[in-house]
Amino acid sequence: MNRQLIDCISVMLETTLNVDSQVINLEGFDISEIDMDLRSKIAGTCSPLEVSLSSKMTENLKNQEDQKRIFCFTDSFGVDYASVLFREDETDRIFQIGPVFLNDLKNPDFVPDILSKNKMTPDFTVPLTEYYYHLPFVNQPTYIAVINGIAGILFGGNDYDVVFIDENNAIHDVLYEPKPNTADDLAVSVLEERYNIENQMLNAVSRGDRREAMRFHNEFRRNKMRSRASDHLRDQRNFMIILNTLCRKAAQEGGVHPVQLNSISRDFALQIEEASGTEELNEISLNIIRVYTSAVSHHSYASYSPMISNAMNYIANHLDLPLSLKDVADSLNVNPSYLSTQFKKETGVTVTDYIRAQKIEYASILLTTTSRQVQEVAEAVGFYDVQYFSKLFKKEKGSTPSTYRQIEAGFESQLRDSRKRVKN
């Protein structure tokens, strides 16, 4: 099961249904870690029905006969969770969806019945009711349809099982028979559409295809998203944090070294929190796509030997210095002649040509993501003769630094205009 696939589904659940999800380890799983503090803040010590719920959930996941199964658990508070077992890095993990509330609070007997079942006093009526109101509400038919839609995405086709288990560990099946043109079908189709768009965007990032990634990114934002926070700016920041994380993972699948990705991700995290408004965040979102795709296009080390990968990584982290073949060889404790021969053999270019190309590429990013003067950009990539820098830049990119900035600004302006037309 592909982790990127799970990450995409998580974003879809959050933006379409306000439903949280996460990946946790199977060993040591404790439902109190995912229940939005219900047991710690409301129930205090767990009721008798709740004592073994975590172990029951874990036991059912461990004992499944195959991987093509989603378990839907209902706890003694009438709250639902969906769990999928998968293996990652030789470790059993759970893709955990929820908590989700499927019941009707208009029923006057619901909360009293829950209190009675859990041997709780009427003093808990108000806090428990408030807890329910903070949970994402999904009606049961839609929930069943969405879970089946997720199963279809994760496992492909219809070869899977969805098993429902109540707080008494009783297993029962819920037959899913979608009818044409129902609201349930619409919920699944919205989820699948958003997944398809986002997945294509991330695939483009992992290939280093900037324009294709931006096209799908713009299309994804056309869809209205439900706000998860009362503060619209905070809500947009949260979305940007998710975008930064997903693009980082996509770039890593594209072969970019984790050291470089950590630096990129950290810089964007700071920019997101320091942004003063939505327009600035919109600019950052475009920069996220641009920088990660550029990293894949020019810094992917997946197909190279460890020595060449380390050489590329050293160059990427020292572009502000006047690097030479000897500098790179010394950093690796290898003979410059040997490094030169192996580098040309694996990459098809010399170390010197590679350094120059990477400096120009980094300069192009600075030109399109900052307002620095050309002289400042040149110095940031280790060139102190701006005319020589401009000459090399034009040879590499086909235009002078100033012209390149204008061309890219025009392309981004088209995307912003398109976004504004959709918004209006």
Image: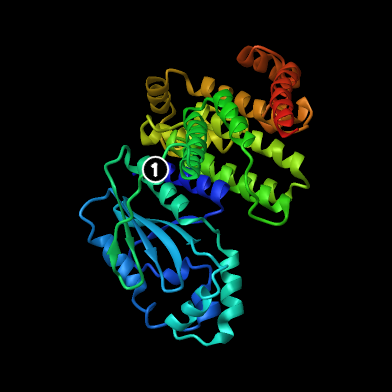
Residue 339, placed above or below residue 133 = above
Query: Where in the figure is residue 269, as x and y percent of width and height?
Result: 63, 48
Query: Where in the figure is residue 298, as x and y percent of width and height?
Result: 52, 27
Left or right: residue 208 versus residue 230 is left
Left or right: residue 39 versus residue 55 is right
Q: Is residue 355 in sight in this rendering?
A: no
User: Depth check: 58 or 265 in front?
Assistant: 58
How is the rendered protein coloured? Answer: rainbow
Q: Is residue 209 in sight in this rendering?
A: yes
Which residue is depicted at the point 60% across and 48% down? 241
Q: Residues within 10 Å of mark 1 (few under 14, many from 20)?
A: few
Residue 376, placed above or below residue 401 = below
Which residue is depicted at the point 62% across and 31% down? 218
User: Depth check: 312 or 60 in front?
Assistant: 60
Residue farthest along the left direction in this orientation: 65
Left or right: residue 82 versus residue 204 is left
Q: For the residue labelled by badge 1, is the local secondary structure a helix, a strand or a loop?
A: loop
Left or right: residue 337 versus residue 171 is right
Which residue is depicted at the point 76% across and 39% down? 279
Q: Which residue is mark 1?
A: 178
User: Depth check: 381 or 255 in front?
Assistant: 255
Query: Where in the figure is residue 362, as x and y percent of width and height?
Result: 62, 29
Residue 100, placed above or below residue 6 = below
Q: In which quadrant of the rendered image does the N terminus lie? A: top left
Which residue is depicted at the point 37% across and 79% down? 49
Q: In which quadrant of the rendered image does the C terminus lie? A: top right
| Amino acid type at mark 1 | Pro
The image quadrant that residue 245 belongs to is top right
Query: Where in the figure is residue 249, as x and y percent of width and height?
Result: 48, 42
